[in-house]
Amino acid sequence: MDMNQPSSIEAAVRSSANAGRERSIGAILIDAGRLSVEAAEKIIREQKAKGLRFGDAAIGLGLLKQDDIDFALARQFDYPYLSAGDGALSSTLVAAYKPASPMVEQLRALRSQLMVRWFSDDTTRRALAVVSAERGEGRSFVAANLAVVFSQLGERTLLIDADLRNPRQHKNFKLDPRTPGLSSVLSGRANGEALIRIPSLVGLSVLPAGAVPPNPQELLARPQFVRLIEQVSKSFDVVIIDTPAADIAADANVVAARAGASLVVARRDHTPAPKIHALTKDLSGANALVVGSVLNSF
């Protein structure tokens, strides 16, 4: 199974990113249908007459909003995000829709900590399982948004939905639930084509869970899952793996052991401390390094 991305695709992505940085804000907004040529000319005249920046002149004239300027700047600096009314992805992906919010700043801080504590050029340290003791603690939310912020950093990022019991990531990224996914790969019915590139977020790919199987733990325990992690770790810089809640089954321990490391998510004023301690003990017993924890209050 070849998980490598074709070099022609990578070259096209690099070319597109460079082109975006070289274009003006006005050109980007015209191409995106957010600004007419006539309005752009009016803004430029105002800009020259008053010595303003293009964005300030446009907002002052009431022809653009700050969201439009942020959109264009993101394209210039190769920092993809979506406008509030885009609808291409679920609104739960706050990193894709509200990159300047305090919530996303915290996710970026978490990203920095993980870069220091775990991720490296070593292919054995590129996968991370996101785990929690119970459902409803924000595990899938954290996994998905972490994948987005890593891709915004320019890292080739893969999000794997290994929750083969109650999968969520196909909903977050608005993928067809009938699309082949991890369960198909592990059962030998699909290969690299199950990885889905997210067009609106350059550098991010998703391997959805696929069809919910009758034997999720047995599938995850197969050697195919180990080989999958090894293969994608050669093609991607960061591999984030969503898992089922630990109180449902031992799947999370199996996945974390295959990944080599885990991030524990708990919800403020919700997760009992004894359950967190039990989870971290189980992870250690499975030889899965716990690289950090997140107290989720979102």
Image: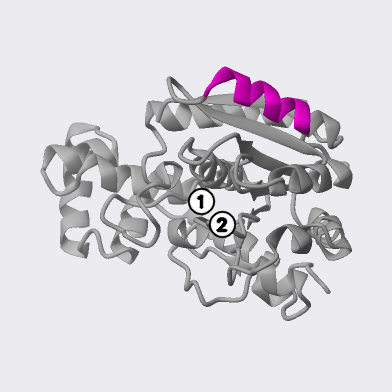
Q: Mark 2 sits on what residue? A: 17
**Label 2, label 1: how far apart the Cα atoms are:** 7 Å
Does residue 35 appear to the left or right of 210 in the view shown?
left
How is colour applied across the structure in the image? one colour
Magenta-highlighted stretch: main secondary structure? helix
- 169 and 117: which is toward the camera: 169
Q: Helix or strand or loop: what does disc 1 sit on? A: helix
Question: Which residue lies at the image location 59% right of the left edge and 66% below the top edge?
Answer: 197
Task: Report how many numbered discs are placed on residues in the image.
Answer: 2
Quarter that holds the N terminus = bottom right
Q: Are marks 2 and 1 in contact (CB under 8 Å)?
A: yes
- Image-based side of 269 in relation to 249, left or right: left
- Rendered image quadrant of residue 101: top left
Task: For mark 2, give the secondary structure.
Answer: helix
What's the amino acid at mark 1?
Arg
As drawn, 110 above or below 91: above
Quadrant of the rendering where the C terminus is positioned: top left
Residue ID at (54%, 40%): 139
Residue 140: % across, % down: 52, 45
Give, as a single range, the part of the protein colored magenta.
Answer: 272-282
Residue 111 visible in the snapshot:
no
Q: Badge 2: how crowded within 10 Å, few (<14), some, or many (20+)?
A: some
Residue 283, numbered circle:
none
Magenta stretch containing residue 25, yes or no? no
Give how far across and how far down residue 20 sits, in percent: 49, 56
Residue labelled with disc 1:
21
Query: Which marked residue is nearer to the observer: mark 2 or mark 1?
Result: 2
Picture coordinates of residue 42, whole percent (x, y): 15, 52
Placement of 217 over or under 126, stated as above or below: below
The quadrant in which residue 229 appears is bottom right
The amino acid on which the numbered mark 2 sits, given as a three-letter code, is Ala
